[in-house]
Structure formats: structure tokens, C-alpha cells
Amino acid sequence: MEAITKEVKKRAKQPVIMKLSPNVTDITETAKAAEAGGADALSLINTLTGMKIDIHKRKFVLANRTGGLSGPAVKPIAVRMVNQVANAVKLPIIGMGGIMTGDDALEFIMAGATAIAVGTANFINPTATLDVIQGIENYMRKYKIDDINELIGCVNRMD
């Protein structure tokens, strides 16, 4: 990861955001390597490797046997990994993985994400991203929070 990041940084004219795979033993090691390589930000998580078998045909559903699992099922894992990485590096983090609502996005932010991305929800609801933004705004109004930076990583400051 460090070597790849360094090579990309040599050629890139724009900021480099390294997307981290959750399919590793320790995501903080990957994050530290990206940081050491000069990444400007991190994006996590990508899909988890999954498998589906058609029990009637007794065959794998996917031609490659495995594929990426995304959506709400991965959210607790993604939130954990964002929190781990936020406590291991100083880079901005784009959190993703199962964000369907403003509450979901707030979990990522409170875990340490400085930004979030909405993916799978857009396939289900074309206004999902706008709904997430509205949910965050409603939360901030309800709790009289003027600056979202107060929420970034706040759970770590409560220990």
C-alpha cells in the first residue's frame, strides 16, 4: 500500500484518496501504509467478500464464485473500521458501507469519518443522498449543534 500510494502521488495532479479493503487482518496497518505513502485521505470500506450458492442447481450463483457484499449488512463492520482507522492515522476519512439514513451517516461521523458516501441506498431510493443530508441537518437542529466538526470522532472523546 505504501509503495502504490507513493507511485500514485508522483503522478497525480489532484489529491489522492486511497480506498481501503476490509478484507485484511488489520485495516489500521493498511491505513498507516497509505498515510506513510503520502495519501491525502482514506476511503473505507469497500465491499466484503461474500458467496452465494443456488441450492436448487447446486452451483455458485456468481461466475467468479465470490463477489462484493455491500449495503446495510456491512455497516457495523464499516463503522468499526472507520473508528479503528480514525484512531490510527491523522488523515481525513470518507466513511461508507451501508449508509441508508442520516442516523447511519452520523454513526460514521461520530466514529471519526470526516465525510461520508452513500452507495447502495441510491439503488433503492433515488433521493437517498438528499434524505441523508436532511437527516443530519435535523439531528443538528434537534441537538443545537452549529458545527458538524463537534460530532467528528466524538465517541472517542467520551472515554
Image (tube, helix red, strand yellow):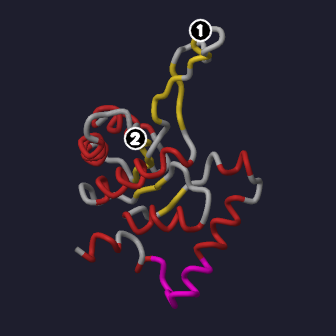
Residue depicted at 46% across the width and 55% down the height:
94
As drawn, the residue found furthest toward the front would be 56
Which amino acid is tagged 1? Arg
Query: What SS does tag 2 mark?
Result: loop
| 85 over 130 or under it: above or below | above
The image quadrant where one finds the N terminus is: top left
Task: Identify the residue position indicated by label 2 in the image.
Answer: 20
| Label 2 – label 1 distance at C-alpha | 33 Å
Residue 74, how many percent across, how many down? 48, 45
Indicate left or right for 107 with 34 as reference: right
Judging depth in this view, the residue of 103 and 130 nearest the camera is: 103
Task: Identify the residue position indicated by label 1 in the image.
Answer: 58
Residue 55 highlighted magenta (yes or no): no
**Residue 117, disc:** none
| Residue stretch rendered in magenta on the structure | 137-148
Residue 16 visible in the displayed image: no
- Count of numbered circles on the image: 2
Label 2 Cα neighbours within 10 Å, binned few <14 / some 14-19 / many ≥20: many
The image quadrant where one finds the C terminus is: bottom left
First in sequence: mark 2 vs mark 1: 2
Query: What SS does tag 1 mark?
Result: loop
Residue 83, how many percent across, how many down? 33, 58
Residue depicted at 63% across the width and 69% down the height:
133
